[in-house]
Image (cartoon, rainbow, N blue to C red):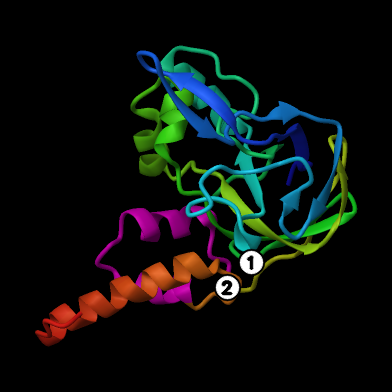
Amino acid sequence: MSKREIVTFAIGKPKTLPYGNGKEIVTGICKDKVEEAFLSKGGFNGDGVADLHFHGGPDRAVCVYPFEHYAQWETEFHQPLPDATFGENLTVSNMLETDVFIGDIYRIGDAVIQVTQGRVPCSTISKRTGLPNIMKRMIETGYTGYLCRVLEEGTVRRDATISLIEQHPAKISILFGNEVYFHQLQNIEAMKRLAEVEALADEWRKSLHKRMARLEGMKDGSTDV
């Protein structure tokens, strides 16, 4: 496999983003490029999120997005995209959703991270880019990027090497997880496979268990689920 590299390293606190016709939103999606930052269990020092319900927390401390998708989106939507368009901390090469598995453990500089879930795109991406359909297309393709927890804190530099320490034995890719989470809403067996990965983010596991319980209840003719 080709060398994994950080293309853009970005962090930033929430700020006001103007969009549409005189509207604005407070969001952490607009990040600034940095050369170095300390990565703690809660995320990079100097980074932050506005909506704590959907972003942040130990299972979502680091946001990663594959650099290769930028070319597709720029071609498809006929406009250039800024660095860290999707609010990711690390824009990386040679780490596509097809090749990265939930539970994989990577060393980046002095820190160690573990992949926990696919990133759930939000409407803020459309507001930032002015592209109403980009969030929909990210979900359709599964090109969402992914989130990670921090196993070992440490300093990360933009030129840090990224090395795979341990590939998760279940080999459930981010792309497969996205397919199950976003599209295979009736596939109980696929949901079970995904939910059984112990490294999966708690929020996704809870969501999958709720869906499975609802489907099982419907199968049993129960009305209290």
Circle 2 residue: 170
Residue 33 inside the magenta-drawn segment: no
Q: Looking at the figure, which quarter contains the C terminus?
A: bottom left
What is the spatial separation of the Cα atoms under label 2 and label 1, in whole angstroms? 9 Å
Which corner quadrant of the image does residue 88 belong to? top right
Answer few, some or many: residues within 10 Å of disc 2's Cα (few below 14, many 20 plus, some between 14 and 19). some
Q: Residue 176 at what x, y percent from top left?
A: 45, 58
Q: Identify the disc placed on residue 122.
A: none
Asked whether residue 183 is drawn in magenta, I would say yes
User: Residue 193: horizontal and vertical position, in percent?
Assistant: 44, 74
Mark before the other along the chain sequence, 2 or 1: 1
- Between residues 47 and 187, which one lies in front from this camera angle? 47
Left or right? Give the position of 76 relative to 7. Answer: left
Q: Residue at x 11, y 81 (%)?
A: 223
**Do the residues bearing badges 2 and 1 touch, measured as CB atoms within 8 Å?**
yes
Q: Is residue 47 above or below residue 21?
A: below
Q: Which residue occupies the foreground of this view, 52 or 3?
A: 52
Q: Which mark is residue 103?
A: 1
The magenta span reads: 171-195
Depicted 27 relative to depicted 218: above or below: above
Q: Name the element at disc 1.
A: loop
**Is 47 positioned to the left or the right of 139 in the image?**
right
Q: Is residue 75 above or below residue 91?
A: above
Residue 206 higher or lower than 101, as above or below? below
Q: Does residue 163 show up?
A: no
Which amino acid type is shown beneath numbered disc 1? Answer: Gly
Kind of residue sitting beneath label 2: Ala
Q: Quadrant of residue 142?
A: top left
